[in-house]
Amino acid sequence: MVEYDRQSLREEPNKPALRTCIVGIGGAGSNVLDRITLDRTVDAQLVCMHTDIRVLGHAMAPTKIQLGAELMRGVGAGGDPDLGREAAMYSRDEIRQAIEGHDIVFICAGLGGGTGSGAAPVVAEIAKSTNSLVYITATMPFSFEGRRRLNQAEEALQQLQKRADALILFENNRMGELTLPKDGIQKAFAQADQLIAQSLRAVSTIVSMPGLVKLGLDDLTSALSTSNGRCLFGFGEARGQNRGTEALKRALKSPLIDQGRLLHQTKTLLVHIAGGETLTLMEVDAIMKQLGRHVPDHTHILFGVAVDAKLGETISVTLISSLGLAQLNTIAAAAPPANMLPLTDRPMPSMADAVAAPPAPAPAPKVRAPASRPTPPVAAAPAMSPAAPATSPSPVRAGPPPFEDSMDMLFKEDEIISQSSLTHLESQGSYKAEAPELFSESFAPAPAASVSAPVAPASVAAYTTAPAHNSPFPPAPAAEMVPEQPPVAYEEEEYYEEETQVVSSTYEPEPEPPAPEPAPAPAPVVRDRPRIEDFIQAAPPPPPQPQQPVSRPPTSPLAAVVARTNLPPEDMAYAPPPNMVMPKKLAGEAQSDLGFSNQDRGRFKDTEPALASGGEDLDVPTWMRLKRKLKR
Ligand SMILES: Nc1nc2c(ncn2[C@@H]2O[C@H](COP(=O)(O)OP(=O)(O)OP(=O)(O)O)[C@@H](O)[C@H]2O)c(=O)[nH]1
């Protein structure tokens, strides 16, 4: 099933690295870029594009482009893709300047709103015209966002499909499983951002990292080539004993793969395994064997392995494929995953509910099916249908077995080659004889380029070229952008802390943390880069009097948006560090000058504020969701 391509085992020594650019468009795109900037794991130029100067002001990407400065006057497109498209057309020179010269341009946007849906096709078109490969990562809106957003998203999707070399589509609905139902919507979005950032990282690594067994752009395109397909993406990484098995388990836990179930349906599956220099062929072999149980024999497996010294003791497993939307819907209707967000209004019990559910009225004997044919234990029935007797599982919809059970069956201990036995086998030399090049010391790869390498200078200095005709707004000076500066360095420990949270929070309730041990005295650390503490401040002292919430009279959705942008400066809990690239004018100032009134609404008349029920603002950048505070 797996073919090792021995011809491409060594990279051409003088082959220049692929130049990669990641463009985040609109609020969702900007949030994913924030995530990537924080993670510092992708070696690419990061460019944030938005019509909304306020979001640009918060964005962490080193290069920012304000779309349609003259047209939009610094506000968002208000859910109108036509405005987003026009704004991008106004700024096409700046867009071209920022992205040309790259071999691959990744475009990342949330579809359904105005800027991402309208501007992303324009950016993709420009990227194509510079002869770059264009990879698009997009999200489809949650079903609760309404039919209008969904329609806008579908329309944008069609336009993107015509321009993309590959399109990875995430459904926000399916990503709901990343968090527990009781978690806030901010957390759900933050987790979704994390997954998308991981996919970008994985894809850019796959296509740019020198591989022992190399996967190319054509492989990736082939894995994603289902028409109207939705992405199946799973990523897991682990260290320590059984790290390969653990990494695979985590990859299979991805809701986009539905705990491995959806892999049974795929025609092509791309599998990429990466590790530090300690990665062994036996570990790779064990991972592929275990994965083989989820994949039918006829599936075409595109397989790649890469060694990157940066990964140290970590092994990562990436699974990428796609399924047609119709097929996905059929599978979901036949047996919805326990934790998937409902696509209809009917509330669907979650795993957390199942855990918290009261015991069945009559204690039922736990019936286990033979391991070869997994059937959910009967005790799971009350969670799906509390009124049903415990001994009668639903005859129509037999849900998947509880996650841990199915995983236990799939990773039976006797079939897992433990780290110690791998080491033992390796010492016997049997694998060395099979593939001596994998064990040859001279085969150690060149150290990978530092992720904090300086970003190519391509920022745009000022926005004075866009014509003012057709602008629905009175003329005002264009916002200036400060020339690009080196990216801010962020605290390393924080990244790892979050990474751990995300990896472990997918399905299982987190165990109680152990009692804290007395912390050892911190050793002095020599640093040559600024630390995040330099930018972090404690939460500002409470104001002398409790502040009244800013009134947002519900006269119209637009009024709510404008009221939000007119917050006095002290309400903006953000003060940019001096070396961060910022528009000269802060959003609060720029937008409070506009003097919006109802008669100025023009094309905004149908707009919706990006506010979820409960008043949470979906446009909040990642770092704010994570409750980070930057200071001068
Ligand atoms: N996964 C994810 N999806 C998001 C996030 N923020 C928004 N979305 C989704 O993306 C869609 C578009 O939202 P935004 O990106 O904020 O909108 P925009 O493109 O900036 O457009 P305007 O706000 O109208 O200018 C929304 O309908 C959500 O479904 C996010 O942080 N993560």
Image (spheres, rainbow, N blue to C red):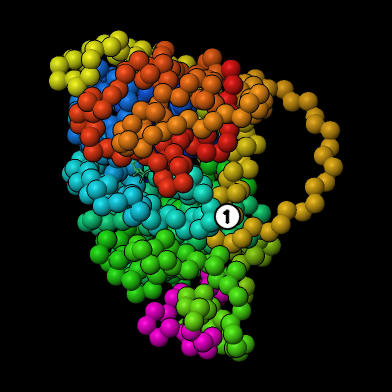
Q: Residue at position x 64%, y 57% from top?
A: 510
| Ligand 1 lies under 8 Å from the Cβ of mark 1 | no
Q: Quadrant of residue 295?
A: bottom left
Q: Which residue is mark 1?
A: 505
- Residue 420 against residue 159 in the figure, above or below: below
**In the image, residue 127 lies at what x, y percent?**
25, 31
**Closer to us: 176 or 494:** 176
Give the quadrant of the C terminus: top right
- Asked which quadrant contains residue 297, the reply is bottom left
Q: Is residue 404 magenta?
A: yes
Q: Residue at x 19, y 34 (%)?
A: 82
Residue 213 visible here: no
Quadrant of picture, ligand 1:
top left
Amino acid type, label 1: Ser
Q: Residue at x 39, y 79 (%)?
A: 397
- Graded by Cα atoms within 10 Å as few (under 14), some (14 to 19) or many (20 or more), the crowding at tag 1 reads some
The x, y position of residue 559, in whole percent, is: 33, 31
Residue 500 appears in view: yes
Q: Residue at x 43, y 67 (%)?
A: 348
Q: Secondary structure at mark 1?
A: loop
